[in-house]
Structure formats: C-alpha cells, structure tokens
Amino acid sequence: MNPVLEAIHKRRSVRSYESKTVSKDIIETIVQAGNEAPSSMNYQPWRFGVVENKEIHQKLLQIALPNAKKIFDNIKEKDPTRYESIMKRFDELEDPVYYSAPVIVFVIGQGIYADHSCPLACVNIMLAAYSLGLGSCWIGLGSLIADNPEARRLLDLKEDEKIFGPIIMGYPKAYPEPPHKKDPEVKWL
C-alpha cells in the first residue's frame, strides 16, 4: 500500500504512553510537518507550543480539568449513565486530559484563515507522528485553558489567538484497534 494511504488508514488516537522521552529531533521533524500543511492563500496562520516539562504539563492539566468537567455537566441530565462513566474515568486516571503524554503540541492560530488552515497542520502533525513510530491524539478538552491568565502567559497567547490542538504524543503502550467507520456518503455528479 502507498505509505501515505497506509498512515491515513492505520493511524489511531492513542491515549496510553510509555514514559520514554521523545527526542528533540523527532519533535522538530513533526512540527516541521505541521508547518508544511496547506493554508488559505499560503498565509500560514499558525505557530506551535511544545510542552515537555512535567511541571508545566501538570499546571495545564490543573487549569483544563475543571473546564473539562464543566463540559460534561451539560450531559449529566440528558445521559446520566454516560456522565457517570466519564466521571469514573476522570477519577481513575492520573491525567484524564493529556493522558500523561510526554509531549503536548499546541497549534496556535490567529486571524481569519486560522479556522480553515490550523486543523490541516494538526492532521499533518498526527500523520508525521505515526510515520515516526509515535502515537498521537487530538485533545479538544486540552484546549480549554485559553481563558486562564497563567496558561495564556505560558503559551504567549495573544488576545486574538486561539488553540487548535493540542495534540498529545509519545511512544504508545498499546495501539488501539480501528473503530468502525461508516461508508462515505458521496454524491457523484
């Protein structure tokens, strides 16, 4: 199979990592792959924040955790069983947001083109990570830190910037089985 198509088919969201450090060279290669993503009018409205420091990781987790729990409060009444299951997982895991991943890459974007372009950088990062033997996962809950002054300071977030990652990555403890995918809905013209 073509290696690009193979990476697209086999890449999975990994949430369980070895504590092994990822080399700076590999991280730089992955970030460069994100930087090579297509962007609207080649504007390249992104920049990257890489967190390897465990203390900063922990600070960001403590900021994100209450906001993440608030998100799930919205389903408490609608689906109490699912809510209880999520909260049980939150209580069981040491890091239910960033999954104790050794690396967190924040894709940070600015301006009108960021909404369309930054997600493409995120995909490139995840495919590059897979191609280099790393697991990765896009973590929406991990971006729920942008309203916090400490997090804004750590990531140097400007007023008009927003977080499009973060993407966690590291050497996987286990690689998940692929989920069932529906057939694509296509209208041929």
Image (cartoon, helix red, strand yellow):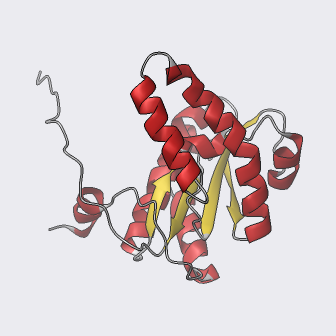
* Residue at x 25% of width, y 69% of height: 3
Q: Is residue 104 left or right of residue 124?
A: right
Residue 144 location (% of width, % of height): 68, 38
Residue 80 location (% of width, % of height): 45, 24
Is 100 rendered above or below residue 171?
above
Q: Quadrant of residue 159?
A: top right
Q: Quadrant of residue 42?
A: top right
Residue 43 location (% of width, % of height): 62, 43
For the residue pair 103 and 75, the one nearer the viewer reads as 75
For the residue pair 85 and 28, the one nearer the viewer reads as 85
Which quadrant of the figure contains the C terminus?
top left
* Residue at x 73% of width, y 41% of height: 145
Count the labels in the image.
0
Residue furthest to the top in view is 78
Residue furthest to the left in view is 188
Asked if one can make out residue 1 in the rendered structure from this viewpoint, the answer is: yes
* Residue at x 51% of width, y 51% of height: 122
Residue 96 location (% of width, % of height): 57, 52
Which quadrant of the figure contains the N terminus?
bottom left
* Residue at x 65% of width, y 42% of height: 143
For the residue pair 156 and 188, the one nearer the viewer reads as 156
Asked if one can make out residue 39 in the rendered structure from this viewpoint, the answer is: no
Q: Is residue 181 left or right of residue 88?
A: left
For the residue pair 79 and 114, the one nearer the viewer reads as 79
